[in-house]
Image (cartoon, coloured by chain):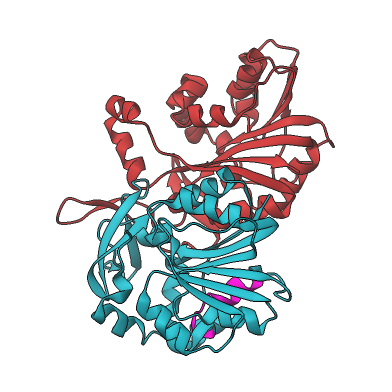
Chain colours: A cyan, B red
Amino acid sequence: MAQNIYDNDDFFAKYSTFRRQVEGLDGAPEWASLRAMLPDMRGLRVLDLGCGFGWFCRWARDAGAVSAVGIDLSERMLARAAEMTGDDGITYLRGDLETVDLPESTFDVVYSSLAFHYVVAFERLVREIWRSLSPGGGLVCSAEHPLYTAPSRPGWITDEDGRKTWPVDSYLKEGPRTTDWLAPGVVKQHRTLGTYVNTLVGCGFVVEHVEEWGPTEEQVAEIPDMAEEWERPTFVLVGARRR
Amino acid sequence: MAQNIYDNDDFFAKYSTFRRQVEGLDGAPEWASLRAMLPDMRGLRVLDLGCGFGWFCRWARDAGAVSAVGIDLSERMLARAAEMTGDDGITYLRGDLETVDLPESTFDVVYSSLAFHYVVAFERLVREIWRSLSPGGGLVCSAEHPLYTAPSRPGWITDEDGRKTWPVDSYLKEGPRTTDWLAPGVVKQHRTLGTYVNTLVGCGFVVEHVEEWGPTEEQVAEIPDMAEEWERPTFVLVGARRR
């Protein structure tokens, strides 16, 4: 089974204070870019893998989706999601993305925000997603950027001239990276951008958009620290379509 | 007009001693990966953009291509290419990838090795390539990897633990980078992997393969310094098909 760090007391307490958890989708700076990749939701059946507090499922329903299914490994996240909604069109299910079986040709859009970099059996999951989409259906997803996950010891350094850089090593060495992020010993899976793209293509997707996300000038004016994303992006967003 | 650094005396003298120039395609460690993306060449019409000494055109003809056209900006490279061939099926033309006009639906395969990172008007060039391919035709190309081109001051550093890293900044700041590589003031164009992929998709290509190239164990056994590619790749290879 996958590591379930989100049900760790400390992790959950800290994670729950994040702007993207408190404010929902609009608290995530990359949301506008993800939304731009999504189709008109009216009449669509939607699946969110790693749904967390259910913000996306609720947004999709508000935007006209006929149904939304959210899957997450964390019981706490799902309990909070259930508390926040009273919509019969939304179904939350507990599931492990390493082993989840998805129903065939059932969804028009599969969405996943910042979950794939936890998944070891990524190709298996992509095959499941492909199978679960209706022909022509779309996948819109994000993951931590390989530049962010690659280093054996991630962190910024500042050189003698004041230049801030992100030292990269091990970029082509795919596999687990253990970091102390909100809690000690959080394991993420590093894979290259090439692997993300080639896995999607190999499973029958047409890749439509790859966005190494950076903030707008307006976002940096509001939160100056966000400028570091221009030096080294944290997120990669991908839009793909089932052939 | 594009910078024509290859006709600089010093640059040309040094560049001509590179293994990939002396030994041809087999002297380029990434060639096996590029070749794996190429179709059976028998009966095909081939274009090489940035053909240099013409190694690829000659290989393509030996592999059964009915014709090969090589385009390069450097008169010296083309003169050397002409010296090395006596094949009426190969045509070398002088042309600037910034402004080149390509004939319509003329080629089955367009190939380009390590030229695109010099091109400012990249989207224009990709449209020309698309137009010049027959429907279903393929583009196989390589460029310097964005991780390699991004930094404002590229170079390896070694930290106190002996860990070798490649400090990255400016990754999302696309545009010119001036380095002293074989000659002072060589200008390359940095663009992200996302931009490479999205430009191809936007011009009507289906992206089939993205390879952030690294050496095999055997290659590193032969040339141990090549292991640094595993830390930070120098090349990205892309295979795409005209829809």
Q: How many marks?
A: 0
Instruction: Say above or below: B100 vs A177.
Output: above
Residue B49 seen by the camera = no
Question: Considering depth in this image, is B215 or A19 the residue closer to the camera?
Answer: A19
Q: Residue at x 68, y 46 (%)?
A: B206
Task: Judge whether B84 appears above or below A114 on screen.
Answer: above
In depth, the one of B45 and A19 nearer the eye is A19
| Secondary structure mainly formed by the magenta segment | helix
Answer whether residue B169 is visible to the viewer in this image.
yes
**Where residue A135 sits in the image (x, y, percent)?**
70, 54
Asked whether A29 falls inside the magenta stretch, the response is: yes
Give the residue at the far top of this rendering: B86
Rendered residue at 38%/34% (across/down): B215
At x 74% / y 49%, what residue is drawn?
A: B204
Residue lying furthest right in this view? B104
**Does B132 appear above or below B180?**
above
Range of magenta residues: A26-36
Q: Position of residue A107 (x, y in %)?
A: 64, 64
In depth, the one of B118 and B64 nearer the eye is B64
Residue A54 lies, with reference to residue B125, above or below; the image says: below
Decide which of B232, A239 is in the foreground and name it.
Answer: A239
| Location of the N terminus of chain A (image quadrant) | bottom left
Does B62 appear in magenta?
A: no
Percent across and percent down for residue B237 are 53, 40
